Image (cartoon, rainbow, N blue to C red):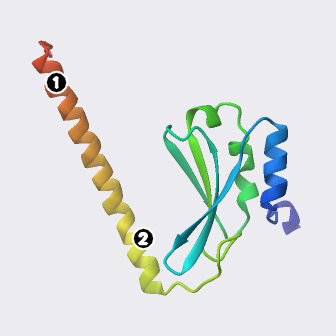
Amino acid sequence: MAQGCIRFRTSDHDAVVAFARLGFTLSPQTLAVGKRTMHYVTIGVTDRPTLIFVHGSPGSRDSFTAYLKDSLLPERYRMVNLDRPGFGYCDSGYASYLEVITAQRSVPEAELALINTKQAQFLSLTDLYRALGGGWE
């Protein structure tokens, strides 16, 4: 019964070949983070906004294959499919509860920093518009 819900991982080689048949370039990557090696695959245009898909427990990266193979998304976004530590092709490892909650706590801070940066960018554009003779009336 669960076999229909969960698929096991596809090798990087098989995934690259399957995507190439559809005209897409899937790029498996690894990144050393501390003592661990993280695994991820990328597809799409590198200078576009990034969509991140995180998998692990349950399922595999194959859960997001439909998005990665979409005909429009790879043209508009850089998509990254990331294996959680200990899942997929990432190194196994033990993360203490403190590491987990510390990482979770940093997410809202990063999101707030992004919002503040975008706000400053929009305010700068408004100032530039006004300086060039534009107005709001």
Q: Residue at x 85, y 55 (%)?
A: 14
Q: Secondary structure at mark 1?
A: helix
- Specify which label sits upstream in the sequence, 2 or 1: 2
> For residue 78, which quarter of the picture?
top right
- Compared to residue 5, the image places residue 93 above or below, namely below
9 to 123, vertically: above or below: below
Callout 2: few (<14), some (14-19), or many (20+) C-alpha neighbours within 10 Å? few
The answer to whether one can see residue 108 in this image is yes
| Residue underneath mark 1 | 128
Where does the image place residue 71, in percent across and percent down from the top left? 71, 32
Q: In this figure, which residue is indicated by the disc labeled 2?
A: 104
The dot on residue 60 is: none
Position of 64 with respect to 97 (left or right) is: right
Q: Locate the N terminus by quadrant.
A: bottom right
- Picture quadrant of residue 38: bottom right
- Residue 119 is left or right of residue 106, and the answer is left
